[in-house]
Structure formats: structure tokens, C-alpha cells
Amino acid sequence: MLDFGMTIGGKSVAGDKTFDVFNPATGELVGRAPNATLDDLDRAVASAKAAFPAWAAKPDAERKAAVAALVAVLEENAEAIAHTLTLEQGKPLGGLGSRFELGGAQAWTGHTASLDLPVKVLQDNNEGRVELHRKPIGVVGSITPWNWPVMIAIWHIMPALRAGNTVVIKPSPFTPLSTLQTVALLSGKLPEGVLNIVTSDDQVANVGAAMSSHPDIGKIVFTGSCATGARVMKSAADTMKRLTLELGGNDAGIVLPDCDPNEIAEKLFWGAFINNGQTCAAMKRLYVHDDIHDAVCDAFVAYARNVKMGNGLDEVNVLGPVNNQMQFDKVASLVADAAKTGNVLLGGAPDEGLFFPITLVSDLPDDAPLIHEEQFGPALPIIRFTDVEEAIAAANASENGLGGSVWSKDVEKAKALALRLECGTAWINSHGGLNPVAPFGGAKMSGIGREFGEEGLFENTEIQVLHI
Ligand code: NAD
């Protein structure tokens, strides 16, 4: 039974109450997480606030080195954390699962540590010198979802620390254990109070909501659904918090008629079904030109049939269950609806427990909910088009704008079309791959701000201009 404390002010805190965490593959209890009260949150914020002046005052090179040293902590504990992650999240240990996620956590930490925050000279002449400095904000509050809990925690924590802020993180109640474990290990290598964690089931107290309005938190970095993101933004208004919001997506992929269906099938599959489709920037709608529509469907089905789904602890599996009942019910209802009006090419009916088979549906009417709503699970609509202008218009006819992709042998043509997609990231001949050097975030309802690279780091700073 996994049992990790919260880390507040460098100490492990059990909390007065706990909540249960279940393995989505088996339904078994895997561990218990502390159920924080609002007093616990206040203590965590107070610790972060107290630790801030000394951490912010450290020479930049020392902070860089401190963040760089965390890579080794993640590396040494990768297998243990990956195991916890598979138990509570369901994703497999292998494939693009838990070990892959821990590898990403190390890569992002290392890259973030390498970034500089130089003073920019805006003017230096007879009329004077003007310098732009980037200073830390204060306490950063991080709120994370259940799909990539360790990686997203790292995406939030590392740039905040690197820039000189201190952090209080709150993971999703579905996957608190791997973040508790990770933060305890990382915090042990940092000064007391620099990195704190509180966990909550969102029932005893809505800790996320309390963080969003907390007077001593200067910035919230939130990854989750659009609806909760909008709530965070509203409750952050009175304290004028800085915000980075990474929200939902309904990414379209557009396949042009010059593609070879068999060549692209594997990449299309993983673009849509990485982590069972429970990925913000997964491909969630696939538009395919009529000339090759049927051949792409056949190649996709042929590839998908051989992908092994099951308990993530069994090394043969590369896909696991849906993480939780709420998400399972959402996918099941969208698929049940799609089955009435479309052509189910594969899957379609729920398996045992939280396992839902890979489901492909073609020939849906334009207004089908499976096309317009974020399914966030193992079901993909495949939509036929004849004129690429129609496909671009349909791709952009979404309130979301996280990612998109264009698939063609003619890269220049694909680039021109990709630049017309209203989204924060567009890929040519792939979908969903992220890179620590490339700023990531959404257009429209998919969020505000960017993470990763220099732009992501800058979001953890306040500009101060000096006129000399
Ligand atoms: P969610 O919005 O339900 O929960 C996210 C977090 O917010 C959880 O920690 C939750 O406890 C907390 N929370 C709940 N109520 C809150 C409130 N009132 N104020 C503040 N925080 C509150 O999202 P989820 O179901 O965990 O995650 C799935 C969603 O996240 C999908 O829409 C997905 O596309 C999106 N997502 C986006 C990205 C991205 O980078 N853009 C990455 C991963 C997931």
C-alpha cells in the first residue's frame, strides 16, 4: 500500500484525514493520500512565502545548478516513481507510458536548468541606459491533471524554481501519489519551503479553488479542462494573479491525398492514442481526403488491431485502462451516440472495468458530438473531405486551438496549410510530439500563455525596467 506524506516546509505532513486512490486497471486500492484542509494549504503557502526571499536572492548560477542537480534525483528514482504512476494512472510501464514520462521529466528539468535569464539592454546611448530585468514573482501555485501527472508537475515546478520563485503544487485527486513521491524526493535537495505539496480530494475542501484566490500566491500555472481553467481565471482576478492556463484541445489532423496510408498508419495511431487518447495535444479528429479515405481507414484498423491493451504492470501491454469512471462514462456516451449515426470500424463497446477498446468511427454527420467535443479517450472520428478548404474550415471551427497537423509528401504545401490552422502548435506528418525547447500552449479556449523554452521561463518572471 502506497503511503506518502505532503511536503510542507521541508517536512513530511500526514494530514488529519486521507483519501483512497485506486488502480484503474484492477479497481484495487493502491494507496492513500493526505486530504488537506485549507489550514494545511495556508501552512504550505506560508512556508513557500518564507522561503522566497533567500531563494530569489541566490546568484542565478547557484539556482541553475540546484535545478540541474534535480535531474539525477529523477533519474535515480525513475523506476520507483514509474511504478507508482502505473498503479494510480493505469498507463503501461513501457511503450509511451510511465518510463517514457519519467524520461520526459528528466529531459525537461535538464533543459530548463540550462536556460538563461540575461539582462537585456534596451538602450545605451547619450540619452541614458535602459535595462530590462526579469525578477521572480513570488509563490507560484501549480494545479495539475491526472493524465501526465509527473511530467506536467515538472513542467510547472522547474521553470518556476529556475526563475527564483517558490512553489506549492496540488495534483489531481485521481493521481496524487506519484507527485507526492516525486516532490518529497526533489524537496529533499532544495532549501526548506522552496517546494511544497498539498493533496486533496476536492470534497473536504476545494484546495485548487482556494489557491486560485489566495492572497499570498502570485501566479497560478494550471493544466486541466477549459471549464476549470475559466473558474481559476475568475477567482484569480481579485488578486491580479499572473496566469498560465494549459487547457483542453480538440486537435484536427488533415491527411492530403498524396499520402501513403500504410506509411502513416503507425504515426496516425500514436498521434491519436498516446496514453489512450488521454492527452491534451492528441489528435482528436482526423480529416482524410476522399481519394485515400478508405485505404487510410483500413491501414489504421490493421495497425490498431495489434496494439496490446491491458494491465500496465504487464510488460506486453502498451495501452492501459481509462483513468477514471467519469472519463470512461464520457467516452462511452460519445461512442454510443456515434454508433447510431456513423460507421464503427473498430471497437465501440466497453470492455471490462475501465478498459475501453480503441474505437474508430467514420462517416459521421458533421454535427456529431464525437467530432465537436473533446473525447479525451480511446475513440477517434475519421471524417471524409474532398476540398482541403473545407477541411481547414472544419478544423478551425472549434473553440479550442491547442494543436493540429497536416500530412502530405509535399512539405511546403503542408506548411502553408498548417500555418492557417488556428492553434498553438502545428505538426507536419506527425502529431503531438513535444520538445522542451519549443513553447507550447493554446490559442482560443485552449489557454493563455506558453510553457517550455525561454518563453515558458519568462512567464515565471516579472519584468522590471531600469532607467539609468
Ligand atoms: P480538471 O479541470 O477536472 O482538473 C484539473 C485540476 O484542477 C485538478 O487538480 C483538480 O483537482 C483541480 N480543480 C478542480 N476544481 C478546481 C477549481 N475550482 N479551481 C482550481 N482547481 C480545481 O481536468 P482533468 O480532468 O484533471 O484533466 C483533463 C483536461 O486537462 C482535459 O481537458 C485536457 O485536454 C486538459 N489538459 C491540457 C493540457 C495542456 O497542456 N493544454 C495538458 C493535459 C491536460
Image (cartoon, rainbow, N blue to C red):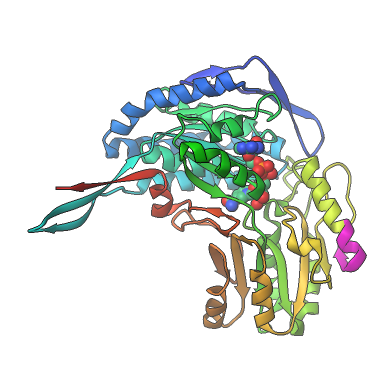
Residue at horizontal 53 percent and vertical 79 percent from the top? 416
Query: In which image quadrant can residue 345 be found?
Result: bottom right
* Viewer can see residue 207: yes
Residues in magenta? 336-346
Seen at 54% across and 57% down, the residue is 434
Nearest to the observer: residue 342 or residue 354:
342
In the image, residue 149 sits, relative to residue 335, either above or below, namely above
Question: In the rendered picture of this protein, how many numbered marks are placed on residues?
Answer: 0
> Considering only vertical position in the picture, is 29 above or below 136?
above
The percent coordinates of residue 163 (x first, y second) are 36, 41
Q: Position of residue 256 (x, y in %)?
A: 66, 80
Q: Picture coordinates of residue 157 (x, y %)? A: 48, 38
Q: Position of residue 340 (x, y in %)?
A: 92, 64
Task: Please identify the quadrant where the N terminus is shown.
Answer: top right
Residue in the image at 59% along x and 56% along y: 446
Residue at the front extreme of this rendering: 238
